[in-house]
Image (cartoon, grey):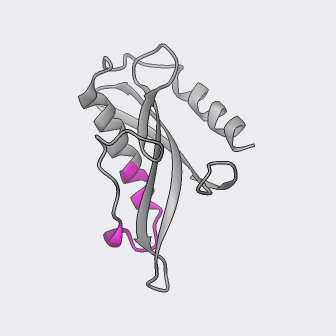
Amino acid sequence: MHKIIFALICCKFLLAGEPPKDSPKVRWKACDAAHDHIRSALKAPKTAEFPNCYRHDELVHTDRLGDQDGGYAVTTYVDAENSFGVKLRGFYMCAVNMPDADHVQTQCLETDADHKKTLRLF
């Protein structure tokens, strides 16, 4: 189910603007935008610890969405405290669209560790 929702979000983002050309710097910006979006939804954002955006492995990666520049899928995690002060790891899949150099649109799914179950969309 979460893959269908994520695909719909990705399609919405691919439909507009003059996006920046794909490059490592643009991918880093997409990853950073995803981290900012996730941070804004946390109970204790100041405690957030994200992996480096240059890392590319099973847990963290930034990939282009389709053949168009400007659309990226970011898979990442964050270690942050909940409202009780307990540090927990959350897993996320984000669709990031950069329709032009000045605008970034981000939508994220919080998932389980295997990315098989959607916990929430924000």
Q: Is residue 89 magenta?
A: no
**In this image, 50 relative to 11: left or right?**
left
Residue 64 position, x and y percent, is: 45, 25
Location of residue 9 by image quarter: top right
Front residue of 24 and 96:
24
Q: Residue furthest left?
A: 25
Point 37% across, 38% down: residue: 56
Give the number of callouts: 0
**In this image, 40 relative to 21: left or right?**
right
Residue 4 position, x and y percent, is: 71, 35
Q: Residue furthest front?
A: 57
Magenta span: chief secondary structure = helix
Q: Residue furthest right?
A: 1
Front residue of 30 and 113:
113
Point 57% across, 30% down: residue: 10
Location of residue 85 by image quarter: bottom left
Point 36% across, 41% down: residue: 31
Point 35% across, 33% down: residue: 103
Q: Residue furthest bottom?
A: 84
In which quadrant will I find the N terminus? Answer: top right
Residue 26 position, x and y percent, is: 29, 29
**In this image, 26 relative to 61: left or right?**
left
Residue 101 position, x and y percent, is: 28, 26
Residue interval drawn in magenta: 35-48
Front residue of 56 and 25:
56
